[in-house]
Amino acid sequence: MIRATVDTSALAPSIRRASQPRSVLGPLLRAWYARQYELVISEHILSELQHALAAPYFSRFLSVTDQEEALHTLRIDATIVPITVVVEGVATHPEDDLILATALSGGVDYLVTLDRQLLALASHGGIRIVTPQAFLTMLATET
């Protein structure tokens, strides 16, 4: 099975848009629910996500209950890995190094992101760094 880390830049909007059939980001979560890939995240990503969902932009679309339910679902159904690989100075922001470290620690095939600086890397340590749209297109060709 394909393993992927989805960073907060793609995960938070995916949660917001999960019910919108025309959104590229909603199908990202639906593909995970359908077990088309294994979602691999870390406590760092969960913490970032919790903070992002509580911010005004997302909280006006998602109630506190919806936010808690989304985080609970991820805690129960996603694969949560400890960060065991050190990544420093690869990304332009230290937080992004932790996203890369999560992907490497989880032995994933893909890092799915909307972050332009991470996308500019194209790959790191054998992990392809792609947009949600590119990942969904790849999943469609694999099945």
Image (tube, grey):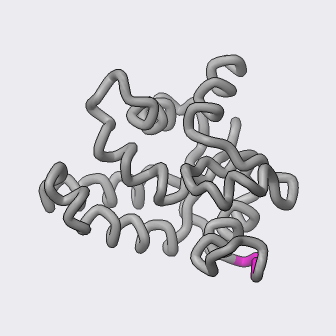
In this orientation, which residue lies closer to the viewer: 95 or 30? 95
Depicted 36 relative to depicted 130: above or below: above
Q: Which residue: 57% across, 32% down?
A: 133
- Considering only vertical position in the picture, is 39 above or below 51? above
Which image quarter holds the N terminus? Answer: top right
Magenta stretch, main secondary structure, is: loop
Image x and y of residue 35, in percent: 53, 32
Magenta residues, as a range? 84-88
* Percent position of residue 51, x then y: 33, 72
Q: x, y (%) of residue 129?
A: 72, 49
Is residue 67 found left or right of 44 in the rendered image? left
Whether residue 86 is visible here, answered yes or no, is no
Q: Is residue 12 magenta?
A: no
Residue placed most toward the observer, 60 or 87: 60
Residue visible at 24% across and 67% down in the picture: 54
In this picture, residue 111 sits left or right of residue 79: right
Give the side of residue 54 with respect to residue 14, left or right: left
Q: Is residue 134 above or below residue 8?
A: above
Q: Residue most toward the right?
A: 126
Measuring 14% from the left and 55% from the top, which residue is drawn there? 60
**Residue at x-position 55% and y-position 60%:** 41
Left or right, residue 57 beside residue 27: left
Residue 141 seen in this snapshot: yes
The one of 72 and 57 positioned closer to us in this rendering:
57
**Quarter occupied by the C terminus:** top right
| Occupied quadrant, residue 94 | bottom right
